[in-house]
Image (tube, grey):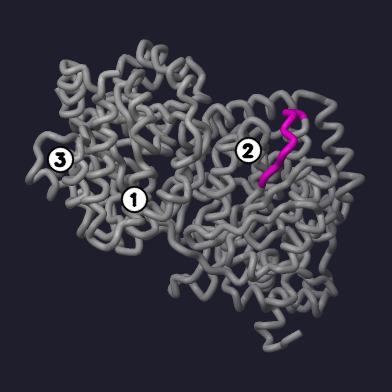
Amino acid sequence: MPENTYKLPDERGHFGKFGGIFVAETLMPALEELRLAYEAALCDPAFRAEFEYELEHYVGRPSPIYHAKRWSELLGGAQIYLKREDLNHTGAHKINNCIGQALLARRMRKPRVIAETGAGQHGVATATVAARYGMECVVYMGSEDVKRQAANVYRMKLLGARVVPVESGSKTLKDALNEAMRDWVTNIADTFYIIGTVAGPHPYPMMVRDFQSVIGRECLEQMPALAGRQPDAVIACVGGGSNAMGIFYDYIPHGEVKLIGVEAAGHGLESGKHAASLTAGRPGVLHGNRTYLLQDDNGQIIETHSISAGLDYPGVGPEHAWLKDSGRAEYVTITDAEALAGFHALCKYEGIIPALESSHALAYAAKLAPTLGKDKVLLVNLSGRGDKDMHTVAEKSGIQF
Amino acid sequence: MSRIASKFAHLQAQSRKALIPFITAGDPEPGQTVPLMQALVAGGADIIELGVPFSDPMADGPTIQRASERALAYGISLRIVLGMVREFRKHDADTPVVLMGYANPVEAYGVEAFARDAKAAGVDGALIVDYPPEECAEFAATLKAAGLDPIFLLAPTSVEARYAEVGAMGSGYIYYVSLKGVTGSAAIDLDEVARRIPAIREKVGLPVGVGFGVRDAATAARIAAVADAVVIGSRIIEIIEQSPPGEAPARVGEFLRGVRVAMDAKG
């Protein structure tokens, strides 16, 4: 796990003015218990060894980096390399974090795990590890999402999880997160809450980042062997921001490598139907931390839109808020239409079906590459595969199954 | 002395305990909030906790979530809530009003502006659920400077080391959340409450109110025997929900009178 000269967050989970612990008193001791257990686990070689063993033998790590030569040539500029998180067991980067947290839950003797999910990817990953370690699993999912993602709901059930539809608020991811928090505060004694992204109260943003940082750490080793050097820029999509933090983290001290996060512009920023919290939001407090939020003038959280359910979240991990304000990373946006074009391009020219989330990062790489020389190198985190998005893409193309 | 402190002093002189009902501003519709507050006072309320609706009420159970959603459907903002308190104050200079809500609407309003405008509207204190003491030293200081009481929660899960910390930062009273879970959860452990209150009172040096899970007069009376105040929220929201249009103030007032009688009865 992390060996890094950049030392954030501070002891109470702050990344500059962002992050922290903004929860009701009832949760404070649980978060303290979690923080202490996590710190102890990090110092335990047996815990680290087991985590690494599972990543290698269960997830299939290290994931390869692939030089998308044909696509790069067609674009006529920088060389695009893809970090293939889509090849992980369960088809995305989410599993890295779930394994880490499930091992921690077992260490803390919590036999029951809960999770929130939007499109269902984190729910499936949580249900997967719960099956693997013999834990009871409850997944909270907005009732709107349950309707839209029937296949993933069935997957979770196959894996032995109970899926609870959430009827409150906008009936989507943020409401599922609220409901999971309510479950946790009620069942603290035997329950571990596996948060799926680098958000939530401390220590979650730090812990999820640490578990996902294996992505960037592998890249640091793989890039010189494959491309002869480190990339000029690392590009990743940002919803909550876990795949981006995972690939950015070890590159933070490498100042010569640009870090670019790609947010979902949905129908366009001016339409108001988007999920670009960093680009178009304002700092505030939600889900236990201070970060950029999409909110109205009265501080109510507003509903977001993205073609990709995994980016459809009104907040963002607090470390991204810090990286933005400090200037270490830059954040850009890609619309639904641009992401779809990126999706089709990778299918057509490289024989890889990417997730719609990852397609945002691909689309930005496709914009950037032609403006750069052929000797420049872009590394894109291909965070997940697109099988789950078949129905969305088909519908956009006017195709019925 | 703040309106809250003098209220507790006055009650103590009479050997009575405070009854603190909670309603969400704007629920069931904005025109009923001030009449509801007045009915609460008529029914025996000593302090009113007025909920500021938020889109993501993470610490609340389904009942108060629904109240928040009904209020938000009317576009109830913090600014409007302050207007309701101003209206209430025109006819009631005596009953303290505590705003209860979440951090984001307050931050969007601006902390300094909130403290100033809340004081001017006649608000007496604020309990921001997702502002634990660790994150809000500045907020608490701003409230105090404006003459408002920052009110904090303690829970059965709180370690005793936190009592003093909360006591140093808070004023007015302490809200002891009597059970694990969200607002409106089922059973309350009265023995646990009775065991905890003396230690809290000693370390915090403030009156202790107990809430979360108080559903009837008998429970309220038993809590009143050990605590300084009884907070009732979800049960009142349920009565509001179940009332025919326009009848919520009368029904809530009637419920509260029963609680008041039970609390004041000398066992």
Magenta stretch holds residue B166: no
Can residue A371 be seen here? The reply is no
In percent of width and height, residue A379 lies at: 74, 58
B198 above or below A382? Answer: above
Q: Quadrant of the N terminus of chain A?
A: top right
Mark 1 — residue? B239
Q: CA distance from mark 1 to mark 2?
A: 44 Å
Mark 2 — residue? A206
Circle 3: is it few (<14), some (14-19), or many (20+) Cα within 10 Å?
many
Which chain is home to disc 1?
A: B
Q: Secondary structure at mark 2?
A: helix
State the residue in front, B78 or A235: B78
Magenta stretch holds residue A110: yes
- The amino acid beneath tag 2 is Met
Q: Quadrant of the C terminus of chain A?
A: bottom right
Circles 1 and 2 on the same chain: no
State the residue in front, B238 or A133: B238
Circle 2: is it few (<14), some (14-19), or many (20+) Cα within 10 Å?
many
Mark 3 — residue? B122
Residue at left offset 74%, top offset 59%: A383
Which chain is home to disc 3?
A: B
In front: label 1 or label 2: 1
Q: Secondary structure at mark 3?
A: loop
Which chain is home to disc 2?
A: A
Can residue A298 be seen here? The reply is yes
In front: label 3 or label 1: 1
In percent of width and height, residue A278 lies at: 50, 56
Residue at left offset 58%, top offset 67%: A144
